[in-house]
Image (cartoon, grey):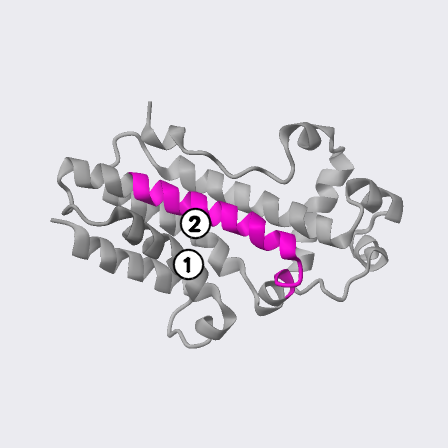
Amino acid sequence: MSPLAALERPRPFLDRERRTQLTQRQREVLELLDPMFRDGFADLTMAEIAARAGCSLRTLYALAPSRDELVLMVVDRQLWRIGGDAQRIIAEDMPPLDAIRAYLRAAHVAVGRATDAWSRDLSTVPAVKALVDSHNQYLVDVTRVLLDTAVARGDVADVDTAAIARVLAGLGRSFAAPEVARTLRSSPPQAADEAVDIILRGLAR
């Protein structure tokens, strides 16, 4: 069994039972909320959200009882979708350093989609932080397991993999902060990809 399979995954906000209970119309509305919220949502009422999504208030309240819970549902779906895509990139026979590079590059997709309005308004929903933190911790855990494998294979020196994993996995989030992103010569995903490459080249024997 792959050592990655033993890692505890983040707990989804929408569990399997709730996902299966969603109607087709509710799924369609959720898809519409993703691009809508990226332009900012802090000033939107449930009535305005329903109007923009072209659905009734009844449909919206059947989906979630509040705007903040809608935001959590959108963020949860985004994170699981991106995380799933990143996980599928890792092939069984891929060298661990290549796997780290490919995995984090895929995870940095989320960084590229963030807007100032989105980042600002997310900070107004406390539960989002716990949700995002759980996914970031999983990112760290996957990176550490792959680094441990690289050390065991002799691909890198016996470094503190917990520390290096936290640095590597945190680059995308750090560079995406609006006050940091504005100072970069490249986009946050490009800058994060480049920093990961530099660190991994420095580690490789």
Looking at the rendering, the stretch of residues picked out in magenta corresponds to 121-145
Q: Where does label 1 land, which residue?
A: 172
Question: Mark 2: which secondary structure?
Answer: helix
For the residues labelled 2 and 1, say whether their Cβ atoms are less than 8 Å apart: yes
Q: CA distance from mark 2 to mark 1?
A: 8 Å
- Residue situated in front as seen by the camera: 117 or 140: 140
Q: Is residue 171 left or right of residue 121?
A: left
Disc 1: CA contacts within 10 A as few (<14), some (14-19) or many (>=20): many
Q: Main secondary structure of the magenta part?
A: helix
Query: Which is more toward the observer, 136 or 36?
Result: 136
Element under disc 1: helix
Q: Earlier in the sequence, mark 2 or mark 1?
A: 2
**Amino acid tagged 1:** Gly
Q: Which residue is mark 2?
A: 107
Observer able to see residue 95: no
Q: Residue at x 54, y 51 (%)?
A: 132
- Disc sitting over residue 68 in the figure: none
Of 139 and 23, the residue lying toward us: 139
Instruction: Indicate the amino acid at tag 2.
Output: Ala
Residue 172 % position (x, y): 41, 58
* Residue 202: x %, y % from top left: 17, 57
